[in-house]
């Protein structure tokens, strides 16, 4: 089986080379074997693991959650209740963020709609930004 260089592993997994090294340093990725020239040599399983980590990061999972998910993946015969709980917790975080972004959107819309497009000393956008108490939503 042909060993894969770190550059090729990064390209195939979509993870940058420094990030591959970082994941190795924090234990998300086992230290790969080394060539005679002391270069890292990766295997297809390492590429799959890196892709898993990249995808989990894209979905916003924190490093410790990914560590737990990888541990679960390494023992596929156990219950998936822990994985479900991690995903549900992430979903709650996303829903909270959506609510916050919707409040932010509404506040920005109100600021823009209230603007008379006159002078800055009468600008509603500037007034609201200068005084958070004028906002209609406190959580944005």
Image: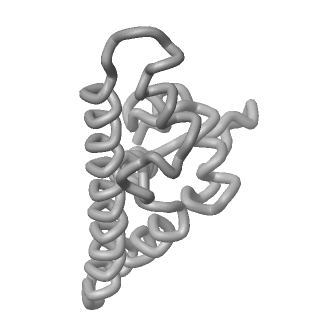
Regarding residue 28, the answer to whether it shows in the image is yes
**Structure colour scheme:** one colour
Count of numbered circles on the image? 0
Drawn side of residue 18 relative to residue 105, left or right: right
Regarding residue 52, the answer to whether it shows in the image is no
Drawn side of residue 97 relative to residue 84, left or right: right
Q: Position of residue 58 (x, y in %)?
A: 37, 46
Using the rendered view, name the quadrant where residue 123 is placed.
top left
Q: Residue at position x 52%, y 35% from top?
A: 129
Q: Residue at position x 50%, y 13% from top?
A: 120
Q: Position of residue 73 (x, y in %)?
A: 35, 72
**Front position in the image: 33 or 19:** 19
The relative height of residue 79 versus residue 38 in the rendered view (above or below) is below
**Front position in the image: 125 or 46:** 125
**Front position in the image: 16 or 56:** 56
**Front position in the image: 5 or 112:** 112
Quarter of the figure with the N terminus: top left
Drawn side of residue 24 relative to residue 121, left or right: right
The relative height of residue 119 versus residue 139 in the rendered view (above or below) is above
Q: Position of residue 128 (x, y in %)?
A: 47, 36
Q: Residue at position x 46%, y 20% from top?
A: 122
Using the rendered view, name the quadrant where residue 75 is placed.
bottom left
Q: Residue at position x 35%, y 45% from top?
A: 104
The relative height of residue 89 versus residue 24 in the rendered view (above or below) is below
């Amino acid at each position: 089986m042909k060993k894969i260089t770190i550059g090729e592993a990064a390209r195939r997994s979509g993870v940058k080379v420094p990030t591959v090294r970082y994941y190795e340093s924090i234990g998300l990725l086992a230290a790969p074997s080394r060539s005679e020239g002391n270069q890292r040599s990766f295997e297809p399983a390492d590429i799959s693991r890196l892709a898993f980590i990249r995808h989990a990061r894209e979905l916003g999972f924190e490093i410790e959650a990914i560590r737990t998910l990888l541990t679960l993946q390494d023992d596929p015969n156990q219950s998936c209740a822990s994985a479900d709980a991690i995903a549900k917790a992430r979903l709650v975080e996303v829903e909270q963020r959506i609510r916050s972004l919707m409040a932010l959107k509404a506040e920005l819309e109100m600021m823009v709609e209230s603007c008379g497009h006159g002078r800055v000393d009468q600008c509603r956008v500037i007034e609201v930004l200068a005084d958070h108490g004028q906002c209609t939503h406190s959580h944005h």
